[in-house]
Amino acid sequence: MKHLADLLLLGDPRLYETCEPVLESELPLVAGWVADLHNVMEEIRAKYQFGRGIAAPQLGIMKRLIYLNIDRPQVVINPELIALSDDMNELWDDCMSFPNLLVRVRRHRKLTMIYRDENWQTHTWEVNDWALSELIQHEYDHLNGVLCTMRAIDEQAFRWRPTPNP
């Protein structure tokens, strides 16, 4: 079982690599990967009070796999963003790989994504919720070796996260 100490941190060269697709033959491995992603996300939530999604490469699993857990767990395998709205929003983005840093970025308000679930079923998901859309874009970027620091709107788009109260 992976833990918070296994999380790759800003500067680790693996965070800048493009991930390989999950193969159908690797499906038996997905449950273990998801358990690791879930465990680390729970540890981040306990320590930093944030965390709605995590991408496999953040734990050194160089596969196109995202784990979301907002109101329920959701496994996203081999996602493809097939439509992004022209309408954009700005936000202070955060990342588990640098939990004390916030980065001002611009993201698409809506998107459509095709992906497979943990049963290898294909889904098309039209995401019209802004908060969910930006989260998916953040995690999807991880699969392509792109961090939100690389999407900063300008050189002043960085700030420290306020420390949560214990």
Image (cartoon, rainbow, N blue to C red):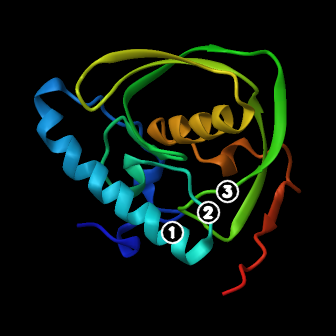
Instruction: Kindly indicate whether the residue at mark 2 contacts the one at mark 3 (C-beta within 8 angstroms).
Output: yes
Callout 2: helix, strand or loop?
loop
Q: Assign the N terminus to one quadrant of the image.
A: bottom left
Q: Earlier in the sequence, mark 3 or mark 1?
A: 1
Of the pair 131 and 104, the residue shown nearer to us: 131
Where's residue 62, x and y in %? Answer: 32, 44
Q: Earlier in the sequence, mark 3 or mark 2?
A: 2
Q: Earlier in the sequence, mark 1 or mark 2?
A: 1
Residue at 57% from the left image edge and 35% from the top image edge = 136
Where's residue 11, x and y in %? Answer: 52, 63
Q: Assign the C terminus to one quadrant of the image.
A: bottom right
Residue density around tag 1, few if under 14, some if 14–19, many if 20 or more, within 10 Å: many
Q: CA distance from mark 3 to mark 2?
A: 9 Å
- Vertically, is 64 above or below 78? below
Query: The residue under label 3 is which amino acid type?
Result: Asp
Residue at 83% from the left image edge and 33% from the top image edge = 89
In front: mark 3 or mark 1? 1
Circle 2 is placed at which residue position? Answer: 50
Circle 3 is placed at which residue position? Answer: 94
Where's residue 28, x and y in %? Answer: 12, 39
Where's residue 30, x and y in %? Answer: 22, 42
Q: CA distance from mark 3 to mark 1?
A: 12 Å
- Vertically, is 86 above or below 102? above
Instruction: Kindly indicate whether the residue at mark 2 contacts the one at mark 1 (C-beta within 8 angstroms).
Output: yes
Residue density around tag 3, few if under 14, some if 14–19, many if 20 or more, within 10 Å: many
Of the pair 47 and 7, the residue shown nearer to us: 47
Circle 1 is placed at which residue position? Answer: 44
Tally of numbered discs: 3
Of the pair 97 and 156, the residue shown nearer to us: 97
Q: Is residue 33 visible?
A: yes
Q: Residue 37 vs residue 154: left or right?
A: left
Quadrant in which residue 151 is drawn:
top right
